[in-house]
Image: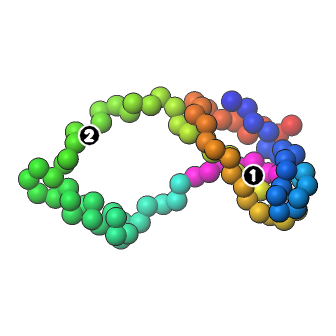
């Protein structure tokens, strides 16, 4: 799917249509020291620790793409609900 790098869209903060830059949402880096990560590691330890078989191949063939719009005037970021696509290309129009 092709998507323009810049789009004219309504900005609720500016309360008007503004030019907004389009970028892709990326998940943050996982911290091994976070409590959930430590608890999960502890749960998996020992005999019978693995609760379900590890997936040999993923069920989904696509990944979710969540666009993030950055308002050029107030620099506030907005996102839209993610859609499933094989490939996304941000193209300059
Ligand atoms: Zn704005």
Left or right, 10 with respect to 60, comes to right
Considering the whole magenta stretch, tell me its main secondary structure: strand
The residue at 68%/47% (across/down) is: 80
Residue 73, by quadrant, is bottom right
Outermost left residue: 47
Magenta stretch, residue numbers: 20-26
The residue at 47%/28% (across/down) is: 61
Q: Identify the secondary structure beneath mark 2.
A: loop
Image height of 30 relative to 1, above or below? below
Q: Identify the secondary structure beneath mark 1.
A: strand
Task: Inspect the magenta stretch and tell me whether residue 84 lies in it.
Answer: no
Q: Are marks 1 and 2 in contact (CB under 8 Å)?
A: no
Front-most of residues 12 and 82 = 12
Q: In the rendered structure, find residue 39 and report the number of the disc placed on it.
A: none
Percent of width and height locating residue 41? 25, 61
What residue is pinned by disc 1? 69
The residue at 20%/56% (across/down) is: 44
**Mark closest to the chain's N terminus, 1 or 2:** 2
Left or right, 24 with respect to 44, comes to right
Percent of width and height locating residue 83? 61, 37
Quadrant housing the N terminus: top right
User: Which of the colour schemes (rainbow, by chain, secondary structure, one colour) is used?
Assistant: rainbow
């Amino acid at each position: 799917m092709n998507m323009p790098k810049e789009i004219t869209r309504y900005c609720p903060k500016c309360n008007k249509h503004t030019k907004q830059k389009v970028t892709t949402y990326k998940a943050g880096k996982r911290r091994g020291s976070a409590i959930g990560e430590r608890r999960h590691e502890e749960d998996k330890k020992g005999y019978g620790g693995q609760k379900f078989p590890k997936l040999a191949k993923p069920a989904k063939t696509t990944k979710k793409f969540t666009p993030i719009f950055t308002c050029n005037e107030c620099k506030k970021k907005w996102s839209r609900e993610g859609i499933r696509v094989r490939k996304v290309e941000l193209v300059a129009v």
